Image (spheres, rainbow, N blue to C red):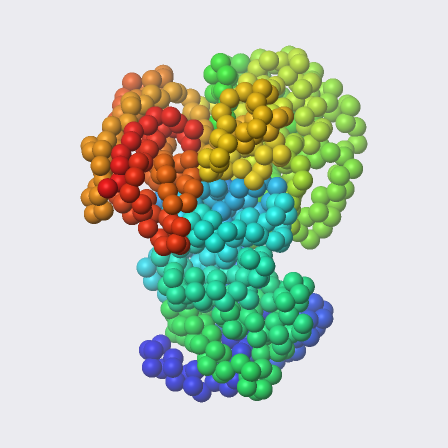
Amino acid sequence: MRTDELKRLLSEMSLEEKIGQMIQIPGYFFEDGHLTGPALEMGLENDDLYLAGSLLSVIGAEKIVSLQKTFMEKQPHHIPMLFMADIINGYRTVYPIPLAQGCSFDPNLAERCASVAARESTASGLHVTFSPMADLVRDARWGRVMESTGEDAYLNGEMTAAMVRGYQGSDLAEKGRIASCLKHFAGYGAPDGGRDYNTVELSPRTLLDDYLPAYQRAVEAGTAMVMTSFNTLDRIPSSANKWLLQTILREQMGFEGVIISDWGALFELLNHGIAADLEEAARLSIQAGVDIDMSSPVYPKALKKLVDAGIVPVELIDLAAWRILELKNKLGLFENPCKDASAEAEQKVLLCPEHRQIAQEAAEKSFVLLKNDGDTLPLDLHASVACIGPYWDTNKLKGAWSIFAEDEDCATLKEVFEKLPFPSIQFAEGCAIADPGTFIVAFRETKEIDFPDPEKALAEAVKLARSADQVALALGEHRETTGEGASHGNLTLPECQLRLLKEVAAVNPNVTVVFFTGRPLDIRAVQQYAKAILVAWMPGTEGAKALARVLTGEVAPSGRLSMAFPYCVGQVPIHYNQMRTGRPFHGDYRKERFFSKYLDIPNEPLYPFGYGLTYTSFAYSPVTLDQTALRAGETLHASVRVTNTGKRAGTETVQLYIRDVAGSVTRPLRELKGFRKVALEPGASQEITFEITEDMLRFHDIHMNFTSEPGAFEVYIGPDSTTENKGTFTLQ
Ligand code: GLC
């Protein structure tokens, strides 16, 4: 629709209609056109339903085509409905969780995964996905670290911008393209105590320099929507935070799209204690700039009263409604209200071989090899193997948010491995996936873990381990103990799994542990008893096949940690780009005091950001710089030569870190500023050169100006965030 026609439409709409566009109703709030219990409890009425501008979590081509027809008939100006849902790591073909995708250090792969997710979900009628999640995460106690691409602002920015490109392409109306909704704005990944929905306390400078850059990259990539987060910043909930939404998001970042609240977040302003009633919550939210109220009674029940009373100018309503109409227009919904919805297309694209292939590639590139003493991996296909653990015979390999996919789409590890040509392969569960008697509080059900005869299962497993040449243990946390609302005070594996590990290792030294998790865990015991450790995260639809190829050496692991594995939960929040402090410490933590350190544990994580092994080894030449001084407008080149010094082909992720040695405020010990993946045959080498420019060195200085400061800089280029392969230059 032409802009002038759209403006005319807005001018003809009643106030109720315009406010209706600002309301999002979840699918389970109505049945056959009538509101259900939760909606009625919320005080919604049928008119709210038919005037609503968007629906949440309604999927399926036939259903959406039928609903769109019904809603448009009842909408006074026949305005099409927007259909939105959480497609965060694939729709029906499911990819590794975003934290695992971050470990691929492959933005192009993330873009391809997003494109396929868009193709599948639009065939099922969707128009918007609540992805990418760009929250920086440093605390594995928070269950939602699985939805982030990790602890580094630069990596997160690369990955989230790539996802926006993959979802949206260059034209939202194009077939197979979906609008992205960046979330959760802002700082949601830093809740006190790692406890979901809790208070976030960040200094303005930490917020601006560490937490906002990845959101900014997604805005620059053109995300159509942004979702406000549940948390407070400086004791102000994001949905009522005018500084955050207007000054930062709209004015500084230049975001012109639609701002939607998170689920019920406007109503939560009452719980936060900053709104006494629905009217106050509505006033605070519309004045802060929230365009759409997701699943709350605030806009439906209070906004019109405020306008009628002259408390809220109608211009704010017009502006919000206009943004929403613009989004519908960019999606082409006025000409084609059902966009790509087609039962025939669903049959063709959902889980098609091409999509499964990308899912397998994404899984293979997301696994991280943490340990491989004595080249225990790859498994020896000419030797017997005992496959033990609760993750061998389950198809629950998809992340917790894969809500539109079927577990039946996933093969189990056992189904794939029993086809491999091992001379002998035997399976035993060994123990439960969580300690018997514990409760798993899943999205919609709570169940108690029941495991009839643990001693018998353990004995059977140990018997197999004793007689096999090699053991592959598949362990991990229960899928439903990660994701939203899944905060943990402890990060260890279940006791029953640790006991299985110890008893198996006691009878067979050749133990490989593959573990499935949505977060970094305290795996000191795994490190102690296993010779090889592979992190599989939650690998998605093709996870089993991908694991078979990596564990047998058909393809080498190439993932690098997007988030550190802490030594123990006492270290978190932990991240590599910390400040030096006035009492920096390096050395034996058991023998020193009066430094910034612990008496009982080391400062260093068990496995740091950027770390990962493969089935070969690489050597780095010293860093060379083509000049020792850099001026604004110039480019300095930093190079290394990387050589494959092993016997197998492998892919290295060469990482560039820069340290600003001194500043008007303290500066991180180092920050990731670039990375390059390089595939090398045995004996081959390649020169890798990074360009360094002044704008890469900017930060918020003592006056909060975003600028660089002259002085000494250190350049580190190596295999992970602990590399000491260093060069130096000065910024003039
Ligand atoms: C949830 C999540 C958010 C999601 C939304 C819609 O509470 O916080 O990430 O997109 O609701 O499902």
Which quadrant of the figure has residue 627? top left
Most foreground residue, 479 or 560: 560
Marker count (numbered): 0
- Which residue is rendered at x = 52% and y = 44% of the image? 137
Percent of width and height locating residue 494 = 69, 32
- Which residue is rendered at x = 66% and y = 41% of the image? 488
- Which residue is rendered at x = 44% and y = 87% of the image? 12
Percent of width and height locating residue 420 = 51, 24
Q: For this view, does 117 lie left or right of residue 492?
A: left
Most foreground residue, 722 or 470: 722
Q: Decide: is 591 above or below 322.
A: above
Percent of width and height locating residue 528 = 60, 19
Report if residue 413 is visible in the image.
Answer: no
Percent of width and height locating residue 271 = 68, 64
Q: Decide: is 696 above or below 645.
A: below
Q: Decide: is 72 above or below 677.
A: below
Q: For this view, does 636 lie left or right of residue 222?
A: left
- Which residue is rendered at x = 24% and y = 42% of the image? 732
Report if residue 627 is visible in the image.
Answer: yes
Most foreground residue, 90 or 292: 292
Most foreground residue, 30 or 493: 493
Q: Decide: is 215 above or below 680.
A: below
Image quadrant for the N terminus? bottom left
